[in-house]
Amino acid sequence: MSAFSFSKKPVKVPLVKTKNRSIQTPVPSPGTEGILENLSNYESRSMQGTVPLVWEKAQGFNVFDHAGNQWIDFTSAIFIANIGHSNPRFIKAIREVLDNNLVHHFTYPSQIKARYYEKLVRFTDGEFDKAFLLSGGTEATEAALKLMRMNGQRTRKKRLGIISMEGSFHGRTLGAQLLGGIKPQKEWIGFEDQGVFHIRCPYPWVLDKGTSPEEFLENELKKLEDEGICLGTDICGAIFETFQGWASFFYPKSFMKAMEAFCRKNKILLTIDEVQSGFARTGVKFGYQHYDIHPDLICCGKGMGSGVALSGVLGKREIMDIPDVGMMSSTNSANPIACAGGMATLEEIVENNLVEEARRKGKVFHEGLNSLKEKYPDRIPYVFGEGMIASVLFKNPKTGEADSLFSSRVSETCMQKGLLVVHTGRESVKMGPPLTISDDALLEGLDVLDEAIRENI
């Protein structure tokens, strides 16, 4: 992570007034510093570190602060607001639940729970039969870990090994971080799970010249065998993010096809972590569809609930029903508010054709970003992503090394100009606007990014 620190004191910036943006005060706006200080006194430090913008309200593709400044949101509140902030159908559905005087029912049945489960499973077009609903994405990956290993016991694997990827992120709880491939983030655990095996990510700068993605995977698996791991009997599961999060990097299709074939041959469950990529974000219903593969399990969250705490695991009946009654449950699972939000999300995606919209706008989005890559070749080595998710990677033009400081400065300049992007703390600036963003706002946001890059060179 970079040592960059955003200014919490108001900075005088050029005023902005367009159809989609309005910056009429210094940024951060006066009063922000006191609110941040109060939060710092009472909120765990781990929750801090975002750009110093105090959200007052968010509607559609815009975020507003208490001073009335208006930003184009290229973050979707970290890829949650796929259907837009404060979506009217979503708000109406939540209000109806509240007016019905049923906001919680533990694991007892309800009509809205039954309707949502059916609608969710049908949304997968026959790929999956059942779902297990939870509150957050990390819970979904924990549940998938449990299902993979319980299935390994059922199929009498000698060990319950899981293959994951270096650099991957699957959440912050114990099991999720053991699966993850970012070592500094799991030093608190004090040990590594000896049954989790990480292979390298096939980044373009990692692939050896002349080595195909399939050969790269074969070589990575051979390394595991050389360490004494029997791939057929010691591995019960494999889990991969749809794309490597920090860079929005989608793996080569042939790599994932080869991984699927390997899993099928060795009776290994293949799990795809769709927490960031699901529900139309990448121009298909679920991101794994870019690879033309059929995973056994997918983990969902973020855009699944459009702001309510909702996540889940979906899979085939024979896997989802392995845990006996009571062996996997959650206090807030499938509560009426979450189900109402989830149902409204699905209805918006289907009725407003947001899968196709994400695909169409994604072409415009990536064409614009790649034009910036051509414009600043000494600064931008890569643009990654699909549909309405993207990352621009920056390098130092003198050394060619990754430049996290430059990306942080670009993120801050964007904020000062009325555009919100995801500050990763690495050499990437990550973006994922609501799928409902207007074409003119999308293009305007790209122009602002261009200005921010130019002004920091």
Image (cartoon, helix red, strand yellow):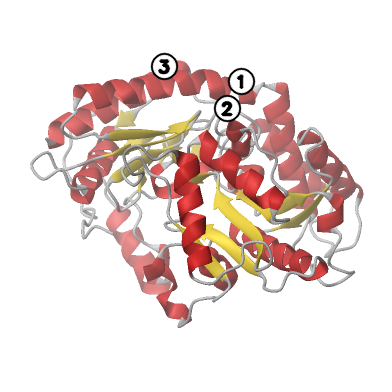
* Residue, disc 3: 440
Asked whether, in this view, residue 368 is left or right of residue 345, the answer is: left
Viewer-proximal residue among 69 and 289: 289
Q: Check residue 356 in the rendering and tell me which mark sits there, or answer none.
A: 1
Of mark 3 and mark 1, the one earlier in the sequence is: 1
Residue at screen point 72% across, 34% down? 346
Q: Quadrant of residue 24?
A: top left
Q: Say whether marks 3 and 1 touch (CB < 8 Å).
A: no
The residue labelled by disc 2 is 283
Q: Quadrant of the N terminus?
A: bottom left
> What secondary structure is marked by label 2?
loop
Q: Is residue 118 above or below residue 61?
A: below
Task: Give residue 33's position: percent from left, percent from top.
Answer: 28, 57
| Identity of the residue drawn at 24% across and 44% down | 407
Q: Upstream in the sequence, badge 1 or badge 2?
A: 2
Residue 404: where, in percent of width, then height?
Answer: 23, 50
Three-letter amino acid code at the position of disc 1: Glu
